[in-house]
Image (spheres, helix red, strand yellow):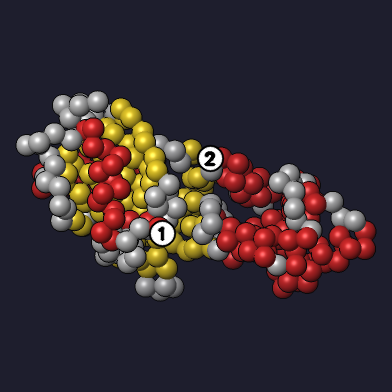
Amino acid sequence: MTLDKAALVAVDWGTTNLRVAVLDADGVVLDKRSSDKGMGSLAPNEFEPVLLALIDDLLQDGAVLPVICSGMVGARQGWQEAPYAKAPCAASGGASALRVATQDARVDVWILPGVQQDKPADVMRGEETQIAGFLAKFPKFDGVICLPGTHTKWVRISAEEIVSFQTYMTGEMFSLLSGQSVLRHSVGADAMDIAAFHEAVGDAMSRPQAVSSKLFSIRAETLLADLPQETARGRLSGYLLGLELAAARPYWLGMDVALVGDLALCGLYKDALEAQGCPSRIHDVSDLTVAGQWAAYLTIKDKL
């Protein structure tokens, strides 16, 4: 591939992985590349060499290739800290993108900012680019975007802006409890009992104050009644998601809800929401990050 076809390199740089998309002048993806050299394993002076190793074949002397980066690359521990935009704000961070000085003159690197909220205190870095990609496809959307994951985000959207948002550590809590707590002896299967999951969601939403006790009952029933691992996993997941939905009710009740993320995980959220009478739609996240990066590029390309 040569520079005359590559107009932009879009970089999604997370804590554990690096994903690169090469786009032409019309925003069409020409190629995708990846690396396991995430932000968490790199010192600030290592980011540029890692990036160049992935895209060196696209570069030519005397020409400059724009690079738009989003995700944890702009965190305090990343390549260079990109200050947060303050909500309410536009999802696309192109207007306040940070230009990074590079050793190699053949690349012009920009890092997109995350978004902060003062009260209640909250931050996101990377999800805002997915939201920008979603809004590029659905500019008239007015409602709530839920991005399930390790730290699930519930984001109120109006007039193409992030109005407010709230983060829930549901995914991380599941990982910790299933992998490091006493429940690791009960929750070992990858398969999940869906009926147990739905029952636990409803139980947690109706009696959230009892969830801590319900969690230990998973272990106790394993010891006393050989509770199947699939049932234990379903209950743990359901209790935690039920707590989240109970707390996030002001975000989803009566709202148009879009679920953006891993299809399987979004499916659990969709089923749990529908059980509460809240319809939702699932959108595959795979292309939204690139769409958001392209939207940012269109904002800043006159500065290049």
Looking at the rendered structure, the secondary structure element under dot 2 is strand
The mark lying in front, picked from 1 and 2, is: 1
Q: Position of residue 108 (x, y in %)?
A: 16, 46
Residue at the image position 26 percent from the left and 38 percent from the top: 55
Is residue 113 in view from this perspective?
no
Q: Residue at x 37, y 73 (%)?
A: 118
Mark 1 or 2, nearer chain start? 1
Q: Nearer the viewer, residue 290 or 250?
A: 290
Amino acid type, mark 2: Ile
Q: Nearer the viewer, residue 48 or 19?
A: 48
Q: Give the percent coordinates (x, y) of residue 36.
A: 43, 47
Label 1, label 2: how many angstroms apart (C-alpha)?
30 Å
Residue visible at 69% across and 48% down in the picture: 275
Whether residue 228 sits left or right of residue 95 in the image: it is: right
Rate crowding at label 1 as few (under 14), some (14 to 19) or many (20 or more) other CA atoms within 10 Å: some
Q: Visible in this render: residue 182?
A: yes
* Residue at image coords 63%, 64%: 176
**For residue 271, above or below residue 236:** above
Q: Is residue 251 above or below residue 297?
A: below
Q: Which residue is mark 1?
A: 40
Task: Please state the horizontal and vertical placement of residue 231, each as a whole percent of the image.
Answer: 80, 51
Question: Which SS class for mark 1?
Answer: helix
Amino acid beneath label 1: Gly
Q: Disc 2 designates what residue?
A: 282
Query: Can you name the residue that lies furthest to the left here?
Result: 62
Q: Which quarter of the image is occupied by the N terminus? A: top left
Does residue 129 appear left or right of residue 238 in this picture?
Answer: left
Q: Position of residue 25 (x, y in %)?
A: 20, 30
State which quadrant residue 212 falls in: bottom right
